[in-house]
Amino acid sequence: MKFGANLPNYGPATTAGSMQDWARRLEEMGYHQLMVSDHVAPTPEVEHLFPAPFYDPFTVLAWLAGITSRVRIGTTVTILPYRHPLLVARQVANIDQLSGGRFVFGAAAGWAAGEFAALGVPYARRGARSDEYLRVMKAFWTRDVVAHDGEFVRFGPVHTGPRPAQPSGPPVWIGGHSAGALRRAARYGDAWHPTSVTADWLVHIGLPALRDTAKRLNLPAPALAPRIKLRLTGRPLPAGRVLGEGSLEQIHDDLVLLDRLGADTVVLDPTFPGQRRDADRDAADLAAFERLAKEVIDLEHGRLR
């Protein structure tokens, strides 16, 4: 099992220096992956949860690729309908090539209706649009020339190079918990990337629904690569908490469960929508990552202590 981190790329305390510090320290600790989030035009409904400034994920990841050497980098998650798929496919391919094949493409259909409106993108049928965009991007990553005539996007022959360093393109992680997201994960995903869920929901609802969906589509179920919270508390939290919140022992138990469920990668997320981030919060979160690396996770061998 690999372990990653959701690196904060938003909020008043976020700067080039803070993101550089996060990236270098987490790579030095031995974490396997750095992920960042995506918003293009934060309207009030978004800014309330993810305060400005919000750094563009592709710009940040291209920069992080140059100041790291080993750690994988990626998005958790790109909102697929926000950008033309040819643009995203080229950005991802370029970063994957420049980073030596370290990109992971997390993607979802999105939720913020106001942001869709600000960008002039229809909110309705965003799932179908996302599916078509994924087909375009996967073709772009594996062919020298692509053309497409679909419902949402049409274009004639386009040359794609440079190809991604990873021969079939970066791994695709599909986020979301809806029936449509599960179908998308089964059809197009190398992994399903649920976020902020309880153990009961994942074990008794989410994973069974994913497997049933894949079976109905006559496809193999994708791997599990969840993003869970990281909030260490002095005392155990009561039942009903989301994965990754609680005492060190509770978080250890959560990771044991995810290992037993066959999780390929677990992304630890110290960000909480609407919660203020400052330099002290960054220091506390990095200390929590360091404590996990020393007491819970054997990062060198990808296993639990």
Image (spheres, rainbow, N blue to C red):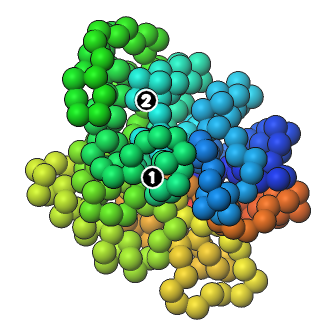
Left or right: residue 144 versus residue 293 is left
- Which badge, 1 or 2, comes first in the chain's sequence? 2
Q: What residue is rendered at 34% in x and 34% in y?
A: 133
User: How packed is label 2: few (under 14 Cα within 10 Å), some, or many (20 or more)?
Assistant: some
Q: Is residue 139 above or below residue 29?
A: above
| Residue type marked 2 | His
User: Closer to the camera, 203 or 81?
Assistant: 81
Q: Is residue 233 above or below residue 193?
A: below
User: Closer to the camera, 304 or 248?
Assistant: 248
Left or right: residue 213 versus residue 279 is left
Left or right: residue 234 versus residue 139 is right
Residue 160 point in image, percent of width and height: 39, 12
Residue 38 point in image, percent of width and height: 58, 45
SS of the residue under disc 1: loop
Residue receiving disc 1: 110
Residue most toward the bottom?
Answer: 238
Q: What residue is rendered at 53% in x and 76% in y?
A: 242
User: Closer to the camera, 241 or 91?
Assistant: 91
Residue 128 point in image, percent of width and height: 27, 45
Q: Is residue 166 visible?
A: no
Q: Quadrant of residue 41?
A: top right
Residue receiving disc 2: 84
Q: What residue is rendered at 28% in x and 12% in y?
A: 156
Rounded to the nearest angstrom, the CA distance separating label 1 from label 2 is: 15 Å
Q: What residue is rendered at 33% in x and 36% in y?
A: 134
Q: Is residue 56 visible?
A: yes
